[in-house]
Image: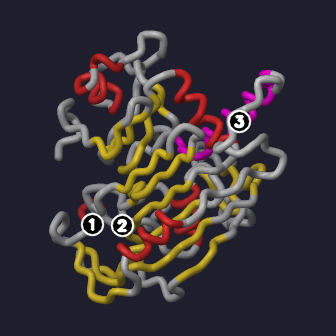
Amino acid sequence: MDAGRTENLSVVYQSQDFLVVNKHWDLRIDSRMWRETPTLQKQLRHRFPELADPDTCYGFRFCHQLDFSTSGALCVALNKAAAGRAYKCFKERRVTKAYLALVRGHVQENQMTISYAIGRNSTEGRAHTMCIEGTQGTQGCENPKPSLTELEVLEHGLYAGAPVSKVLLRPLTGRTHQLRVHCSALSHPVVGDLTYGQALDQEDQPFRMMLHAFYLRIPTHTERVEACTPDPFVPALDACWSPHTLVQSLDQLVQVLRTAPDPGPTEGSPAPCSTPTPPSKPPETEAQRASCLQWLSEWTLEPDN
């Protein structure tokens, strides 16, 4: 599928208040560049011109973001009230996300929790990248924060003849580039990750970065926004991927995701998303909002590098 075609928009969830789309890889969400460039915003405006809101900068309220190179589930709020409800769930960290990835090498442990603290890389020329605390070869890892990722191995196989593993990743925190940095820290970088992966000859590079936002659940107090996108990492779609050992069934893990309770609000958060905000609650201060927006930005990981 050509990401540059405005008609190529895949919708996996739709209600009166929300859309969840299956974003193409190597596609910007929006852009202020002067030259014509394909964006998800333009695809949405083409498919749903009647839903575009002139009061917003780009016509649509994106509840979160995805890296330019990452494909998968992305939620769009269709009005200001819905955006506020989704914002509250992200603020309280009650959103469930799961990603699929192909990573280099055969991961030996079938299940693990990765807990490396992640901060900004202060090495010259690497200002837009992240690193784990104590990384050798960097000038410094600024402001490292605790970071948790759950990893479960699905399959082992070969990609273009090289050993790889197909994994399910669940970020329990939301740091910039968290999944890519954590996989790289295990010496199992995401296939096609040119920023955190191993240097390979250009002709050996795959056609995309093999990271996909597979599952998303946002439990607002008016509806449970839930979407599961198709698995893009199957031999029928990419002949270079040849799995040979099944470790865990993806279908079974999907059922676990669907039936798992929603995460509880973080300590110090207001009432959970299932409970409307009391009318007497004082309005959010600018400082609080700025803090929340900073946290939200960490879920998406850096715009185009």
Residue 285 occupies quadrant: top right
Q: In the image, residue 221 lies at what x, y percent?
A: 59, 40
Front in this rendered view, residue 258 or 246: 258
Q: Quadrant of residue 202?
A: bottom left
Q: Are marks 2 and 1 in contact (CB under 8 Å)?
A: yes
Gap in angstroms between the C-alphas marked 3 and 2: 38 Å
Residue 168 position in % (x across, y down): 45, 70
Which disc is residue 200 wearing? Answer: 2
Task: State the separation of the CA atoms marked 2 and 1.
Answer: 6 Å
Residue 107 in the image, given as x and y percentages of width and height: 47, 83
Residue 110 falls left or right of residue 175: left
Instruction: Say what secondary structure mark 3 lies in.
Output: helix
Question: Vertically, is 270 above or below 204?
Answer: above
**Is the stretch drawn in magenta largely helix, strand or loop?**
helix
Part of the protein shown in magenta: 283-302
Where is mark 1, residue-wise?
204
The kind of residue on which mark 3 rests is Cys
